[in-house]
Structure formats: C-alpha cells, structure tokens
Amino acid sequence: MGRIGTIARRTFLVGSAALLGGVAFGYYKYKQPVDNPLDDDLAQGEAALTPYVLINADGVTLITPRADKGQGAYSVQAALIAEELDVELDQIKVDPGPPSAAYWNTAIADEGVPFPSTDRGMAAETMRGFMGAVIKLMGMQITGGSTTVPDGFEKLRVAGAVARETLKAAAAEVSGLSVTQLKTERGAVVLPDGKRIPYEALAAKAAEIDPVTDVTLRPSTQWRLVGKPMQRVDMVAKSTGTQAYGIDLRMEGMVHAAVRVNPRKGGEMLSFDASEAEGMRGVQKVIPVTGGVGVIADNTWRAFQAVDAIDVEWGAAPYPAEQSEHWQALVDTIEAGDADATPRDDGDVDGIAATVEAEFRAPYLAHAPLEPMNATVLVTDNRVDVWTGNQIPRMTQASVAKMTGMDLDDVHVHILMMGGSFGHRLEDEAVKRTTELAMAMKGTPVKLTYKREEDTLQDFTRPLALMRGRGAVADGKVTAMDIQVAAPSIMDSQMAERQGFPVPGPDTTITQSLWDQPYAIPNYRVTGYRAPKLGPVSSWRSVGSSQNGFFHENFLNALIHEAGADPVEERLRLMTDDSSRKVLEAVAEMSGWGGELAANKARGVAFCLSFGTPCAQIIEITNGEDGIKLDKVWVAAEVGKVVDPVNFENLVAGGVIWGLGHAINSQITYADGMAEQENFWDFEGLRNYQTPEIIVRGMENRDYVTGVGEPPVPPAAPALAEAIFRATGERPVEMPFGNAFTFV
Amino acid sequence: MKLTVNGVAHDVDVEEDMPLLWVLRDELKLDGPKYGCGVAACGACTVHVDGVAVRSCQTMVGDVDGPVTTIEGLGNPDEMHAVQAAWLKHQVAQCGYCQGGQMMQAADLLANNPNPTDADIDDAMSGNLCRCGTYPRIRDAVKTAAETLKVS
C-alpha cells in the first residue's frame, strides 16, 4: 500500500508513463471517446480511462480501485486483469490506487434507470449508457450496488490485454522478432526458443512506446482464471491474523483519539465540561468537533475513558424524538396521498375489489461492521493525508479539501482494507471528525477510533418503511396486487444533505425491487411515498430492496395462500423472465419442493430481482417446543458468469445469513431522539447456533454479468416469513420477527 | 507490570485496569486481537491466557496471571497452526476482522475437545460474532482442524 500514492497524480494519469524504472499503463483509450455524451453511440463510444496495471522492478501491481470490504473485490478485480495479462495471482500485488476520476463506476447508475434490469432493449440500454456517462463525467469512483464485477468484467480484461500487447510490442523491439512470434505466460514474454523476458525487464521499454490499444478479448473457452476456483489474494493474511485494516494503522508520532458526538444525530452540543478528562493519564488535548467533542491521548483506551468522562449537554434532535412518531409519519405520508412515484401501474387496480389487505413494517437498522469506524489524518502546511477504509474516496477527498482549504490535488486519500461495511463506509463522517481533530494537531498524525457505542449511535441507518397492500385472487390465481410504500429518502439524507449532491426526480430506492419484479399480475400497481425527514438514513446492504423484498414477497405469498395455489407454481405461472424462472425452478429442484415434511417442519419460498440479479430461496424450519429453528436454506442466483465459485458461495451464504439475522434479531428504535441500541448485546445479526445449513447454486444462463453482494439479502426474510406462517398459522407482519416469535 | 506474550517477556507501565486488548494493541503493537465491541459481546479480541480463551477487552491486565498467546503466537503464514491451515483451506474469511478471534476460540475448543459435535461447535463458537456470515465455513474448518490434530 502507499507505493502508488507516491507517484505524482498527473504523471500517473497521462499516458503509459515511465516512472521509477517502470511503467504504468494509464489513461489510454481503447475506444474513442465521444464529444457529446448524449450521442446515440455512447454505449459503444465511452472512453476507458483505466490505469490498472503498474509494472516496475519490484514486479507487477494490479490496481483494484473498487474497495474491499470483505467481499473479495481485490481478488476478483485482479483476476479479471490477470486473465488477459497472463500473470498468476500468486505473482502480483494489488493496490487500490489513488482516488481518481479514471476509476468511474458506470454500473452504479443502472439500478436507478426506469427500466427493469431484465430489459436489455435499445431504450433501456441507451438510458443506462446515458446514466453511465453522467457518472463518468462526475468521475464517481464508488464501490456499491453489487457493481464491481459487472462494471469491471470487460473493462479490467481489456486493461490486462492492452498491457500484455504493449509488453509484447516492447519485447518485439528488444528481440528483433515479430509480435506474432511471441507468447506470454506467468508474467513473462516467451520467445520462440523458450527464452523468457519477465515483464519487469520490459517495463522501461514499454513506457517509451505507444500503448497497443487494438486488442481482442479471449473467448470464454480460453479462460484460465475466470470461472475457476481461486484462492483470494487476502486469504493467507486473513487466516493468520496478519491482515492489517484501517484500525491497525500505526505511524511514527501518531496519537489516538476518541469522540462523542450528539447521539441525537445532527443536534448540537450545547456545552461541555472536560475538567476531569483533562487530568486523566495520557490525555493530551480536548478538542470540540462538529456536534461534539474529541480527546487526543497516547492510547486508544485512555482516549475512550477520557471522552466518556466529559460532561456534555446535548441539544435536541432535528427529527421526531420517539419511535412511535416515526411510524406515524409514514402512516401520515401514505394517507396524504402525495406520491413520489408510481413506477408500475398495469391493468385497473382501482376497479378490483380487494379480498386481501395487509400492512407490513421494516425497522431502522444499523450497519455495524465489526471493525468500527476509524480514520487517520495528518495535516501539514502543504498537504493532507487520509488513511481509511472507504467506498467513496473522491467524495472524501473533496470533503477534506473543503474543510482544510487545501487544493484537491493536495489531499491524498489512501484506502485501507475494511473489516466489513455493508454500506457504512459509503459515509465519511469519521474522516470529517478526524480531520477536525488533525487540524487542531497540525503535523501530528491523528488516529480516531469510534467506540462501538459511538459507531452504533451515530450510524446513518437503513430507512424504516411501511407498506400497505391490497390484492385480489380468482380461480386459484393472483389477479391484483396494489402496493403502497412509504419511507424516508436515502437520496435526500445521504446524497443531498451529507454529500451536497442532490439527485433529481423520484427516489428510486423507495420503490426498489417492488415495481420491476418479473410477474405478469394483470392488475399490478406500485406507489412510493417519500416521507419527510426522519432519522438520518443511508444505503444498507441491498438498500431499498432489503425491506421491499420482504414487503413484496410476503404479500405475494399471502395472496397465493388466499388463492389456494402453490407458491412456487403460481410464481412460475406469473413469471415473465426466463432466467428468473430458472432460479426458482432450481431451488424447487434442489430442495425437493412439494415433498412430505415432518409434522413440525415447514418451508417457505421467496424470490427477488435486485441489482440485476434474480435470486430465489427456500427455507426449511422446525417449529419446536422451545421455538423456531432455522434448519436449511436452498438459494440460487443468476449472474451470467460466476467469476470465482469459492468466493461466490461464501458471499451468497453470507447474504442469506445477513438477511435472516436482521429479519429475526435486529432493530434500531429511537427514544428521546437517540437510538436505544448501542452494542452487539442489543443489536446482533445471526449467531453461529442460529445459522442454518445453506446450499448455494450459481447460474449462468445470461450473456451479461451481474453482481451478487446484495441480491441474496432480500429473499431471505420473506421466505422465512412464509415458513413461519405455514408452521404457526400466523404471518409475520413486522421485522424483526423476534418481537413476535421465539427463535432458538 | 510483567507480561509474557507469545513467549516474550515484557515490562509494561500501564494502569492495572487497562484491558489486556489495549495493552497488546497500543503498547505492544500486536494487532491480531481486534477491537469490536469492548464488552465481550463479539469475540474479535479473543486471546489465550494460560491456554484458555478469554475476551481480552474485558480482561484487566492486572488480573492476567499467566502467559498470553495471541493469534500471532498461534502460528504464522510460514508455520500455520492446524486451525489456521483449516481456515485457509476452507477460505473462511470475507472481511476477516473476526477471524483471529474465531481461530483462537476454535483452538481452545479443540484443545479441550478433540471430537466436537455440531452442538459442541455451536456452543463454543456462538460468542464469536461474524457480521459477514461465514459461520458455515467456520463449522467446516473446525472439523477439518480436528481431523488434522488427531492425525498429528
């Protein structure tokens, strides 16, 4: 880490630059850029500003700008580059690189376009291309939305191919041979006589020539890495306790900090008395920060102790103080009838007499990655350095530049390995607080570590949400489904309020995975209502789909039950998308759906199309004397191509566990303007003893690639809700289910 | 205050009520034990004291009365403990932040129970939280490590 950061940004980003006796394949164009981003040809015409390969005397470094939160992003990006570059994963280093507009993420906008992700027609693709161009122009380097693989699947292989062909051209010049006589393997160009020229030895020559940009990607039949089981590049370190995370950063002269910020989030600090804290051992300084106060000490624990010893008077919360008021705000929002969007309106819902009605609720949830928020910042006269685990390095760079009055180029953000995120590290409040402390400690590196309680209390949560459904059935079929959902807006809170980046139009996260499900219900309407500002909210693993998957599928299951139909068969009958049908058929086949079950066992099924990936799940539970036990889950997801089956299985199982754990165990509620939960004893996901056996199948029936970090989450809760209904006769209407049911 | 960690004797000048975790991390620069909760609710800080797994965030250093072993002392990339080798074989980790604590807990389990049943594994490992949800692989890896330890 850090080696790339020492390269002058401008040098790095212009041409394949000679540096330190090496070469960085940067800023090349493999397709001509277009002048007008609205041009119809845009989808084919986007420039790829992709500095992804660095070679110098030390070896080959692959730049993996999508942040690794544990999902294996570094490895999957490295594998895609290495596939064409002809290096093996045990030969290379990975580095996230500096924040750069070059690392824009096109795919991140796909979830926001008004076309179902299964629609690959011209209008939908043109819109995606346009949104991608906007993202590119903004240089939005962001990790999220299950986009790392779809965004990089071609781009990173092209980067590898360009670097490989340029190295071959360099080898041709050195050897006097024709490029067609040269081969590449294991990090070397191989001459016809078997002599090998390591890439490192060709770096200086490659830096002198124009990059070879006319490359053809290898067909899938020739892939060495993609689709094969891999060992992740971080796995040895993570299996031996030697992986360093942001919280482990140590620097000469570094001091340790803790903060307490008003737990009524966004409220003021009215006064504080730090006289006791100032006298405590190791305490160097007490520094007010936005909405709170920080302590600088010589040890993290001493900073924690001291900051807790400060007597603080907090101001009021800029949102309703009590949880009941938050729920009432959602009810009022729906009943006021002022829709944010009605993205689906098929048939005549108003003309149908509803025979089934329901109201479902999903609570606020904290992200709570196991590594608490932390950052290290060093402010000097002419530059600022930030070390942190973060998914939005460019926004963070801009925030810090604004706070410190530095030029953007003088703010250096170094991204470190993250101990989880689940969306928490799409925010950068911890960096801002650290920057405030570091500005008061000029010349001294300051590492701020949040106490777990601070991390939970300050979390910008998943929105709470309320759904009202009306529906009808006839002749054993679902004939009408009318869903209204109200939630506070992530776009208002996260993007507009905290990042200064208002997103125009409806907030698509409010109706995410409600309106675009591949069901041909004849009368089918989805209406979203944007609640007024409540508790601050943010993106949480699978975003709007996390609550909407539960709402949609729990209600669809209720309708199917009313119709007297089988929940798998009726879904298959309604489904309009072939790949979605296949994932549902897969879990039915894997689980032996329809077979006899023991008297105290029950099964439930659910499906959700989110982030472009159809995912179906069936869960089996035992309704025992002491409570409900989760026995087994079968899950299938369609992604076009499984890049690494080993990591895929882990991510999918983890997504199911994430979905189940929060569905039964977790909620954030407000009292007196503060979250009532603060640590893992009152906010925990699933524990080992509650975890079911999970059988995973990845499916490859499509010719485009989608991600899998988030899609396994939404179907987990509604599948479980259906199993609980079948076991107990009572349908869960509110998460966490643990409020109404006992789990063992 | 005298403290032996991974076979090395140290003399540390800290408060007796400082949690062992912060002595290890901030005084001895051993970053394998992780801070996750501070209240013994997640297990990321798990180390062995006198061969027994403890939550170092809730163990005051003044109460430590035996040698301390951290994940760094269990084994290293060149010479892995059977538990670490099993964790690598099964590619258990996602973010990996909890895994040092998980492995220390698993090593303690296997030292006392060479043939753990699924229920034994659940009992021993359920105090160690994994937010990524790697529990199925943790179970598999514990079983693999048990087999390895029986053979060796």
Image (spheres, coloured by chain):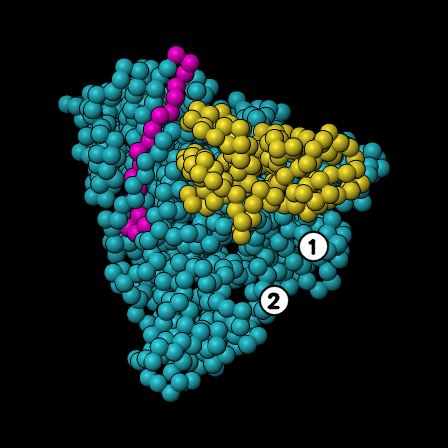
The magenta-colored residue range is A625-642
Give chain B's shade: yellow
Identity of the amino acid at label 2?
Answer: Thr
From the image, tell me which residue sits under label 2.
A6
Which of the numbered marks, if any, corresponds to residue A251?
1
Task: Identify the residue at image location x=34%, y=80%.
Answer: A193
Query: Regarding mark 2 in the picture, which secondary structure is present there?
Result: helix
Q: Earlier in the sequence, mark 1 or mark 2?
A: 2
Vertical placement of A398 versus A543: above or below?
below
Q: Judge whether residue B35 can be spotted in this image.
A: no
Give chain A's shade: cyan
Q: Is residue A600 magenta?
A: no
* Residue A372 image position (x, y, % from top left): 59, 40
Query: Regarding mark 1 in the picture, which secondary structure is present there?
Result: loop
- Residue at far front of view: B152
Q: Judge whether residue A671 can be spotted in this image.
A: yes
* Residue A11 image position (x, y, % from top left): 55, 73
Is residue A266 rendered to the left or right of residue A70? right
Which SS type dominates the magenta stretch? strand
Identity of the amino acid at label 1?
Answer: Met
